[in-house]
Image (spheres, rainbow, N blue to C red):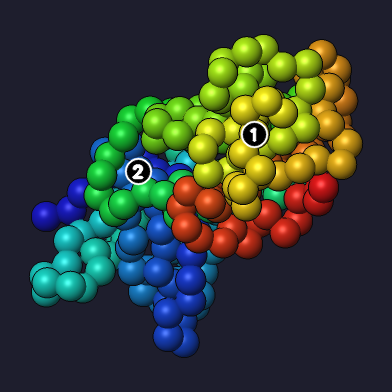
Amino acid sequence: MSEKTEAFIISKEESGDSSYVVTFYSKLFGKINLFVKSARTSKKRFQGKLESGNLYDIEFIKAKKLGSLDSLIKIDINNDNRFINFDKDISIFQALILEAINKFEINEQPNFEIYEILKFFSLNINSHGKIKKIKIAIKTLNKYLKILGIQPSIKKCYKCKKNMHSIKYFDLKNGGSVCSKCKSNNNSSIFNLKNPINIKKLSNNYESLEILLLLISKFCEYHSGKIFNSVKYLRTT
């Protein structure tokens, strides 16, 4: 008996000479790994249909042997899919979002909110403005971290809860922005920014938004305990 669902492709890896193992985040089953037999040679069935970030209608069959992967048998572009423009920044932002979900999520633990976050990103990232695009990436990542219960504080000190005029220190371990009074001098997980981020000017300053996205990405790495390949393409402080 087969299963059907809507799903985004998170990643894919080669398996043998002609096959793939594709990781999806699906509406009904959460994160799943599916074996796609002869994907690289069967052009009629799979050509152009295994691209990361796209929304698909998929059908798969459960593995008969314990420990074996379920197998993808059919895949088609979903009617709600929005093909993402070929854009370097968008590609980096998309890779970061997909990698975060891949690193944090456990297989077959469905969460409809996470599926909706991926739809939000897909529907909104094709913006003409650089600032709007990076804001969508930051908003998507923050929404996801909120679902996980580890969203970092940005505009307030995570400790004393006071509003901040600028971000000078960012604590990866304990919760994000921290003021100079609350900052621990013996905490190696604190980023000390050479050029503090001005909170009032943040929404219209691309350079500051780049640094903020990097900080949130480093926060993700710290709390997942894993290195994100996409982070190396972000602006460095």
2 or 1: mark nearer the eye: 1
Residue drawn at (60%, 47%), measured in percent from left and top?
187
In the image, 62 versus 220, the foreground residue is: 220
Q: Which of the 4 quarters of the picture holds residue 181?
A: top right
The residue labelled by disc 2 is: 26
Q: Is residue 48 above or below residue 43?
A: above
Label 2 or label 1, whichever comes before in sequence order: 2
Q: Indicate which disc residue 213 carries.
A: none
- Work out whether residue 48 can be spotted: no
Residue 24 percent location from the top left of the image: 40, 52
Which labelled disc corresponds to residue 183?
A: 1
- SS for dot 2: strand
Task: Identify the residue shown where x is 58% and y is 43%.
Answer: 172
Do the CB atoms of the residues marked 2 and 1 lie less than 8 Å apart? Answer: no
Residue 220: percent from left, percent from top? 54, 46
The secondary structure type at the circle numbered 1 is loop
Could you say which is closer to the camera, residue 20 or residue 224? 224
Residue at 11% across / 55% down in the picture?
1
Residue 37 vertical position relative to residue 171 in the rendered view, above or below = below
Residue 30 position by quadrant: top left
Q: Is residue 138 left or right of residue 60?
A: right
| Direction from residue 150 to residue 85 in the image, left or right | right
* Identity, as a three-letter code, of the amino acid under mark 2: Ser
Q: Is residue 64 above or below residue 236?
A: below
For the point 25% across and 69% down, the residue is 69
The answer to whether one can see residue 235 in this image is yes
The quarter holding residue 33 reads bottom left
Task: Estimate the x, y position of residue 156 in percent, counting from the top left.
Answer: 63, 18
